Amino acid sequence: MTTVAQTASILTLDNFWLSVGLKIVVVLGLFFVVPLVVGYMEHKVMAHQQDRIGPMEAGPHGTLQLVADGIKFIQKEDIIPSAADRKVFALAPGLALVPAMLIFLVLPLAPSFWVEDLELGLFYALAISSVSVLGILMGGWASANKFSLFGGIRAAAQLIAYELPLILAAAAVALQAESLSLVDIIEAQATMSLLGTDVNMWFVFPQALGFAIFFVAAMAELNRPPFDMPIADSELVFGFMTEYTGIKFAMFLLTEYAGMVSMSALMVVLYLGGWQIAPGVPLPGCDGAGGIFGCDFIGAAIGFGVTMGKIFFLTFLMVWARVTYPRLREDQLQKMSWLVFVPLALLNIAVVAVGKVFA
Amino acid sequence: MGDLDTREQVHPGTAPGEDLVLEIRGDGDFDTADMTLSIGPAHPATHGVLRVILEMDGEKIRDAHPVIGYMHRGFEKLAEARDFRQIMALTNRHDWLSGFSNELGVALAAERLMEFEVPDRAQWIRMLLAEWNRVLNHLMFVGSYAIELGAITPMFYAFREREDIQFLLESATGGRLHFTYNQVGGVKIDLPKGFMKESTDLSAMVRKRLQDYVDLVLGNEIFHARTKGIGPLPPEVALAYGVTGPTLQAAGVPEDSRVTEPYLKYGEIDVRVPTGTNGDSFDRFAVLLGRIEASLDLIDQIHDHMPAGPVNSKLPKIVKAPEGYTYIRTENPLGQLGYYLESDGGKNPWRLKMRTPSFSNVQVLPYLLRGALVPDAVAILGSVFFVVGDVDR
């Protein structure tokens, strides 16, 4: 069944150390560049939807705004509250940030362009994203500030509650693709046809419910409005991030944007067919399975562009939701997750399972 | 395991004016203490420097104590050192979102003492600007209430409207926030040419844009979930605390000074007072939007009625009020504003006491906050409309 599973990507070279070095460069490059572009998009989209124009000074049309922000954060004084638990306080941002970086290890972004195609790619991605919760909780506790503690506790409750719909929705995809490997899932979408016909389609069509659940649960996982109760800047000043300054604060912010990118990338892979332009349309220059594998350089470049376009579209939706909706209260959040999303996600799995057995 | 029944009372360090007692249950082995959280004085949720001390049990509020006075500037004492021209600039500033309405009240009080006749045109101009001021004030609260609940966009739309209105008012009065346009006996100077047309156009535009708030906020399910049933204020409690304005009208009581005790020319036009049914936070917001629309209707009516004529009377070099006292009630955007003006025959007031709406509105906060959760506390704080300068003077 699996023809491209656990395929080595172009980043795996003969020389082991060169390979590792190249992969590290790619991960760090993606991790630091793409969230910044998404951040710029957020500034501009939010601004235009609020009848203003956004950053215009730093760089042409404000394109270097986030770079300027990064430099500003680096040169800020590092303040640690006197009552804070110093070690935990210092470790918390790192613990939140590193898992967000590690997800990039398994994301396939273009034909033959991924760092590592793990057999348990999906499992790894979801598991590692849960580790960030620990960093948030540590940040909230170690800040020795009641508001931060509130934020940390709310974050822990919220993130645990929304893990379940996320995982259940992803499980339905794995069920349909018959594999946990992310590259496999893309291949399954490219070779899947609608029941009884020859029409190729992505998983978003039979699993639209699962896609919606995954999208909402991802926003809740990332503490994005309307699920930003842990940050809730009108109540808790800035929640668990209140006492952080300088680079530590920048690390928390980067975690959020990197999380947006990685969750969107996961959604693109799981539901939107990865780097395929449209269902049934093969990529030019590719002659492998489903018309999207075994590509030459042009095909890979186009594939990369397609993936990035889809990621930006999904992050645009997240920004749009941020601008439009007020915040949900924490208990309403929890109710929604346990009483609405989990049953719907289970229903989704049931439908997929039945479909898989009979089709 | 310790004995959970022993109780120890502890007086934590408190600020002046507070008397808090914390109960620590248990004998130390396993003890729980209620947490005291101080929202403010500098906090994004309170409109200004209001401090609210919450005694909490987890996220539930057991009691709330507002601490006011952080913005006391001694207005009433300062008023005793101002003559009847300077007092306009002073009274602008206690409720800075309704500057014109404040000045209006003091001008009416002084005119009543001096038995001054105010020309008709001046009265209609005063009404027009007072209603624009009301729209300004309510738009601000629409934006700030939404942003406290997490909806970041209505704030920008509200300020877009406010900028246009402030530009209009600046063309007439010279000020965007503090107008100093009233004087004893009328207004300082006539409206500029083209003002009435601008005002008509602006009123149509604001009315059209009001739909944005209904779509984005009033009709939003998350907003409903956050505000329906939160902080219900029964009418008897509201009246007992002396709450006035949109907060009282949302509780179902159609009390409005423009209707019950008409001043200026409000008796000649049709003043609509929207009321709510439950007195909860949702109703307060809905009443706010309703009042904006009612004010726009009033503005349109005033446009039709505006007479020609002089706008002020010649004042003597030194304006002195005869001995006596008077109390005047006006409907400020936030509620009923009362001025007690006592004069001893000199050019400064002997005593100017301000009965401000925000002071009474803030008093009802402990009643509303008891039993609420912290996010609801923010929803309630945002929905009981007050300006801290008005509370403290």
Image (tube, coloured by chain):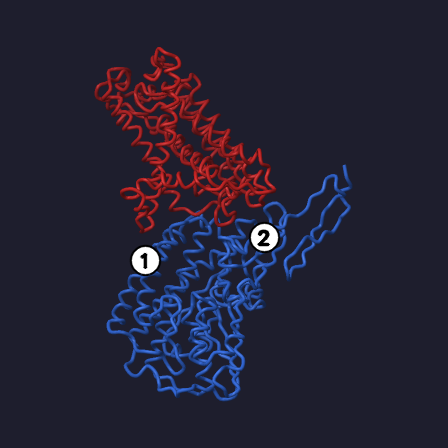
**Residue with the mark numbered 1:** B209
- A63 or B296, nearer to the observer: A63
Compared with B366, A32 (above or below) is above
Relative horizontal placement of residue A251, taking residue A292 as reference (left or right)? right
Amino acid identity at mark 1: Arg
**Residue closest to the far left:** A284
**Residue closest to the far top:** A14
| Dot 2 crowding, Cα within 10 Å, few <14, some 14–19, many 20+ | some
- A252 or B260, nearer to the observer: A252
Residue A130 lies, in percent from the top left, at: 49, 29
Choose the circle earlier in sequence order: 1 or 2.
2
Total marks drawn?
2
The chain identifier of the residue carrying mark 1 reads B
Give me the chain that's blue: B
Specify the colour of chain A. red
Q: Which mark is residue B38?
A: 2
Q: How far is disc 1 from disc 2 in space, using C-alphas?
A: 38 Å
From the viewer's perspective, is the residue at label 1 or at label 2 nearer? 2
| Residue B57 visible in this rendered orientation of the protein | yes
Amino acid identity at mark 2: Ser
The chain identifier of the residue carrying mark 2 reads B
